Image (cartoon, rainbow, N blue to C red):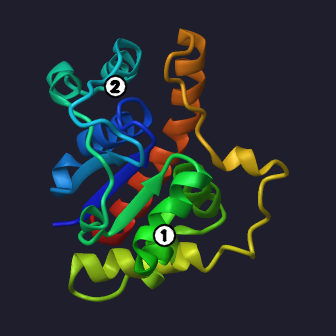
Amino acid sequence: MIQILTVCTGNICRSPLAAQVLAHRLSDLGVEVTSAGTRARADDRMPVEAAELALAAGVLAESSHAHRARYLTEALLQGPDLVLAMDRDHRREIVELAPGKLRATFTVREFERLAAATSDDALRAGAVGADPHERLRGALAVLAGQRGLVLPPADPADDDVVDPYRRSRETYARSGAQLMPGLDAVERVVRLAVG
């Protein structure tokens, strides 16, 4: 089973939203999507605003209600085929914990940017083999190979999803608007590789 891990700071806003949306969208492929936080306090719940964004994206309310935060550990990074960070600091912390995950770890907006510059044919060409994990690894290697070839954003912060925690509903909406195109790109790549 393909595994995706999403990571933010507290594991109550951005990463659970991303995980729940991806789990909903990729449920027909049997993809397992979980989340964790670099500074999470165990068992914290999603704020109402984040749960509302999940509901608007088609996630069942029970999924958001059942979410409990968990702290990112090295052990949690052993299984995932793809790790999606919500910002560059999270990506750095992930790679420090598990250097072997470098080519499989992206900020979600970086993933979107690299995927936009990569054709379906190029992704399919990288996704070879009988094993779905191997095919996804191949597609991710194609994306990782675009680093340094695709122009970075003018402002490096454009690879980050804004943290809405304890901020206005407008900030939650902006965070969600930054997140969703990256999730679209992840769905596209996973479906091309293993669908």
Mark earlier in primary sequence (2, 1): 2
The amino acid pointed to by label 1 is Val
Q: Under tag 2, what secondary structure?
A: helix
Residue 95, numbered label? 1
Which quadrant holds the C terminus? bottom left
Which residue occupies 51% across, 68% down?
120
Give the residue number, with chain letter if any, for mark 2: 54
Viewer-nearest residue: 180 or 171: 171
Residue 140 visible in the snapshot:
no
Is 143 displayed left or right of 184 in the figure?
Answer: right
Q: Position of residue 30 (x, y in %)?
A: 15, 56
- Location of residue 90 with respect to 41 vertically, above or below: below
Are discs 2 and 1 less than 8 Å apart at CB? no
Q: Amino acid at mark 2?
A: Ala
Q: How many marks?
A: 2
Tell me what residue is drawn at x 66 percent, y 50 percent: 159
Q: In which quadrant will I find the N terminus?
A: bottom left
